[in-house]
Amino acid sequence: MNVSEFQADLRAWLDDNDLTPGADHSLEAHIKQFGRVCAALYDADWMRYGWPVEAGGLGGPVMLRAVVGEEVVGRGLAEPGPYSMLEVLAPTMIDYAPPELAAEMVPRLLSGRELWCQGFSEPGSGSDLASLSTRATPDGDNWIIKGQKVWTSFAQYSTRCVLLTRTAPGHDGITAFFVDMDTPGITVRPLRTMHGVDEFCEVYFDDVVVPAERMLGKPGDGWRLAMDLLPFERSTCFWQRIAYLYSRMDRLIAETTETDDAELGEAYLALHTLRCRSRATQHRLDGGTRLGPDTSIDKVLLATAEQKLFDTARGMLPGAIELNDSSWRTEFLYSRAATIYGGTSEIQRNIIARRLLDLGKE
């Protein structure tokens, strides 16, 4: 399918179908609005393009998924955060779940009927994923899971969780499961961050029983799954966020009367560089390339552009961040985390140095 024609048809459809969000800007309202938008897009088949037929999709270039995300988020119809989970977790299910499980579950995610979360980080083992300690112990046809996860986005609204556990020592002892969040023994505790939103959660697993058929891959495949998932977390999930950042730059220009052309130019250049890089990543994925450590470049560029944009807003809108309880304040505070979430910028630069530039470990 021609991408330009697809985009034109989608834009026309969105013009004719009112999916404007309501006045409630709470996190819960954003989650509900995301489900509403996904349901409408799925029913009209837009959300199914770019996904494999065997998982409930309609096939076609991966680029079509990027077009849908950019249009939806760029128009302010949905927030980029919940959308990013779809782009990170659906490919993982398709690649690692038993085919019949993927065929059953992925349409639920694409259609907005369900939201999933990602149980990776733990207290003391955030960027050091290999040191995780949440344990899964075999028990007949089940596994018993005990441990704690943290920084789990949208866990309080999620139906399922892609969960990493330890089943043996070392990297080869990490195993992934697809866990129903209403299973007895799971406790979710939201964490309110400095920008005033409880997007992240602690999740406790106290002797949680998970059927063996809910394992993703084989015992010990968890590290490989994580290494395949993280490039999506550092690239494709940004397609929507980039569109969102461009919309915020447009709003900044509209709201300010005294423009600093140099600052705006630097912010635009950072965004444009990020978008060009993201576009190249989309084409590589569309061409069948398996994403890897090269996506650390995307992540560094995203963090740089996001913080540069909101630093510029702080300078051009005096008091809007320090004195006013506005969306600019919330977003400026959230942008401070851009160099942390998805792997810190220091970690990303180490990956670039060691795995792309072959500069060694020192």
Image (cartoon, rainbow, N blue to C red):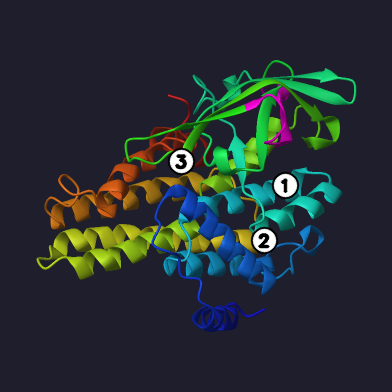
Residue type at tag 2: Ser
Q: Is residue 174 magenta?
A: yes
Report which residue position mark 3 lands on. Answer: 199
Report which residue position mark 1 lands on. Answer: 93
Residue type at tag 3: Glu
Report which residue position mark 2 lands on. Answer: 111
Residue 255 horizontal side relative to residue 58, left or right: left
Above or below residue 330? Residue 83 is below
Picture residue at 54% right of the left edge, 24% below the top: 122
Residue type at tag 1: Met
Q: Which residues are magenta?
A: 171-186
Badge 2 density bin: few <14, some 14–19, many ≥20, Cα 10 Å: many
Residue 355 horizontal side relative to residue 171, left or right: left
Above or below residue 57? Residue 234 is above
- Of badges 2 and 1, nearer the viewer stands 2
Q: Residue furthest left?
A: 258
Question: SS at mark 3?
Answer: loop
